[in-house]
Image (spheres, rainbow, N blue to C red):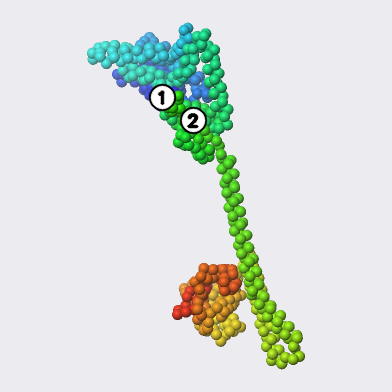
Amino acid sequence: MGRLSRLIAGCAGIAVAVFGVVSTRTLDDGGPPEGYSSTPAVALIPAGIALLVQAAPISGGGAGRLRAGAAVLLALSATGLATAALVDQPAASVATLLSGLALAFLDLRLPRQDGSMPFRVADPLLLGVAVIALVALVSRLFATPGRGPDSVMSLSQAGALLLLTAGAFLARPRPLRALDRALDEAQADPEQRPLVEELRDREDFAQTLLQSMNEAVMVLDANYRVIDVNRRWRELTGYADDDVSRDPPPLPPPGSGGDWTIPRADGTAVPVLASMAAIPDAAGTTRGYVATCVDIAERKHAEDALTEHAAELERGNAQLASALAFKNDLTSMLTHDVAQPISSIASLAELLCADWADLPDDIRLELATKIDKNTRRLVKMMNDLQLLFRLDTGSVTARRVPAPLLEVVRTVSATMAGEDVEVAIDEDLAALIDRGHLTVVVENLLKNALTHGAPPIVVQAEPQGTAVLLVVQDSGPGIPEDVLPGLFGRFSRGAGLGLFIVRHLVEANGGTVRYEHATPQGARLLVTLERAPA
């Protein structure tokens, strides 16, 4: 029985049962009946429910046996109720009794003596119901008003019986396939019996082969209607055995295949390796299709895990490449920037030791001063490297306090080259920043201006709402365009570690640093910090 046939039969059963309930409470003339047992219409209630149960899409297992038993009991109840009303309304009672028997034995088949197709018991019973209802319907339709066979049955009752008959015909189980019918007919011929047995064995072998395959297989006809599926398909999709007649899921075009997804009964989707092949006949015309699906969920999980692992390796390689670049830059800096002051210290110290007695005091003082200057340069370089390592590990913390900008800038500029630095900062202007960090920031900005720029160097600061802007400007040629993208990098060409340290310390205190070209020439480094409350 198809899905549409089940739906129509079920609706017919509901309509008949409702009619039975209404008819037990109202006669044709509008008056109440004498009792529920005096009219066969009361038997239509269990008969309609029996039809509804027969149309239910349950066919196998314990649920299927329970459905069949319930339908039989309801149909026999309708038969009993119709028998009780035979005296008052014989025609309607007989028709209702026959319909109840037909519903009770809807799937009962009796073998024929000639070995042909088995005889279905319900068919003549339903035919008798239809004949009685049609006779009553025609006689009522063409009777003269006020005269006629009113005692046969009412128009509505005849219509309900016809509806019940039609629903019962639709609710009959699906007939045997053409092959099964042919085999049953051939089975009766002793000469063809060995051939029939061989054909049945081949069919059983093909069905066993289909069900034992590890791949999920769906067989469709030329119109893409599902003919059969194997056990693995039902396991993969989660559909029950009696749901084979449903519409097929989206499948690849015939002759193609690849990665696909098949919907499951629970609403999820399972990844599969799908293929779709046409089944041609001897003339090459497509008779049907076979779809084969292999569950690749585990493979997809493995691919996702492999992709994630490859991404982790990619990130690890990037970190290693960054570490290698850091090592190369550090080695280059140490080779150049550290070797130069050490070489100078060694040469000056050797000269002092070798010619100490012959050197005048002023030359001795000059050489000692140069040694001291190079030593301080080395110490500064080591402190910058130590700060660099702390910045890389994230161990630098800022203790922000109100720091007077004018005081810090004057102190730093006095130790470097006070005569070449102009300071224009209001005495009351202060920023929220770690004072030690501010000192390092100003030192590196001034060192960068003195080393790569030209005097005069101007340091100025001004309030901007809740922020304060600190600017260090020189009068040199400015910073080349090709250097700007990596200006605040770890080992910026021509800037060493200074601007990298400036950026990280400013950001650790909640500020920003940027570069601008000065007018008409020069470089401007601008640091924005949070302004300290007055």
Name which quarter of the figure residue 165 lies in.
top left
Residue at 54% x, 24% y: name it: 207
Residue at 52% x, 27% y: name it: 241
| Rendered view: 125 above or below 483 | above
* Amino acid type of the residue tagged 1 in the rendering: Ser
Name which quarter of the figure residue 140 lies in.
top left
Disc 1 versus disc 2: nearer the observer: 2
Q: Nearer the viewer, residue 100 or 151?
A: 100
Classify residue 474 as left or right of residue 96: right
Q: CA distance from mark 1 to mark 2?
A: 27 Å
Residue 27 x %, y %: 33, 18
The answer to whether marks 1 and 2 mark residues whose Cβ atoms lie closer than 8 Å is no
Q: Secondary structure at mark 2?
A: strand
* Amino acid type of the residue tagged 2 in the rendering: Val
Res 104 seen here: no
Residue 441 x %, y %: 57, 75
> Farthest residue in the front direction?
283
| Rendered view: 10 above or below 252 | above
Residue 2 x %, y %: 43, 25
Residue 479 x %, y %: 51, 75
Residue tagged by mark 1?
Answer: 5
How many numbered discs, if any? Answer: 2
Name which quarter of the figure residue 345 lies in.
bottom right
Label whose residue precedes the other's in the sequence (1 or 2)? 1
* Quadrant containing the N terminus in the rendered view: top left
Residue tagged by mark 2?
Answer: 290
Crowd tier of the residue under label 2, counting other residues whose Cα lies within 10 Å: few below 14, some 14–19, many 20 or above:
many
Crowd tier of the residue under label 1, counting other residues whose Cα lies within 10 Å: few below 14, some 14–19, many 20 or above:
some
Classify residue 286 as left or right of residue 323: left
